[in-house]
Image (spheres, rainbow, N blue to C red):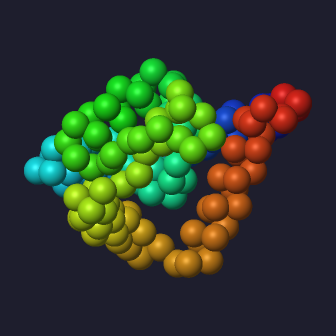
Amino acid sequence: MASLYLNEKKRQVERRRAAQMMKRILIHFHSQMDEALRPQGVTIAQLRLLKTVREEPGASGAQLARSCYMTPQSAQSLLTGLERDGWIVRSKGRGNDRILAARVTPEGEKLLETAEKAAKVIEGKLWRGVAEDSIEALNGVLEQCLANLGPESNGS
């Protein structure tokens, strides 16, 4: 009985440790990306939104917010900044005059290129010495974890 308790305690410690390491990796990655992007005057959130505008041209602010996992108010604020800085332009949508559709400007494309280069350098550091099959296995584990926490999860 005592060994079952110890095994369960060890599993709990290891699971918590894994979750903490995931969070630390994200914090370090974001910190290094912020540092790399600071000279361009852009944040990770702005960049994510800019990339989504490129991937979903003509999407409404609400659609972009959903794609970026942010509130519509946050997305609108960031879109305003991206437009002010000349990285996107917005115009009335074809089907609905109330919706402003955004598209990336050439300056925004240059910013995305610069950011992609910075991200590749940081990702290279992150994955140095890690075998591809380990990354594939990790992706499988993380996908399962996301599915477990997703809205369709039944909590078991």
Q: Quadrant of the C terminus?
A: top right
Q: Nearer the viewer, residue 62 or 117?
A: 62
Which residue reaches farthest top?
73
**Residue at image coords 52%, 78%:** 131
Where residue 70 sits: x, y (%)? 51, 30
Q: Is residue 15 left or right of residue 32?
A: right
**Residue at image coords 45%, 50%:** 53
Q: In which image quadrant can residue 155 be found?
A: top right
**Residue at image coords 27%, 62%:** 106
Q: Nearer the viewer, residue 51 or 35?
A: 51
Q: Is residue 101 left or right of residue 32?
A: right
Q: Vertical placement of 34 versus 69: above or below?
A: below
Residue 34, visible in the rendered structure: no
Residue 95, visible in the rendered structure: yes
Q: In which image quadrant can residue 83 be found?
A: top left
Q: Nearer the viewer, residue 76 or 151?
A: 76
Where residue 60 sits: x, y (%)? 54, 37
Q: Vertical placement of 91 versus 56: above or below?
A: above
Number of marks in picture: 0
Q: Quadrant of the N terminus?
A: top right
Where residue 118 sits: x, y (%)? 26, 63
Q: Nearer the viewer, residue 103 or 155?
A: 103
Q: Vertical placement of 119 versus 74: above or below?
A: below
Q: Is residue 127 left or right of residue 120?
A: right
Where residue 39 sits: x, y (%)? 11, 50
Q: Is residue 19 left or right of residue 84?
A: right
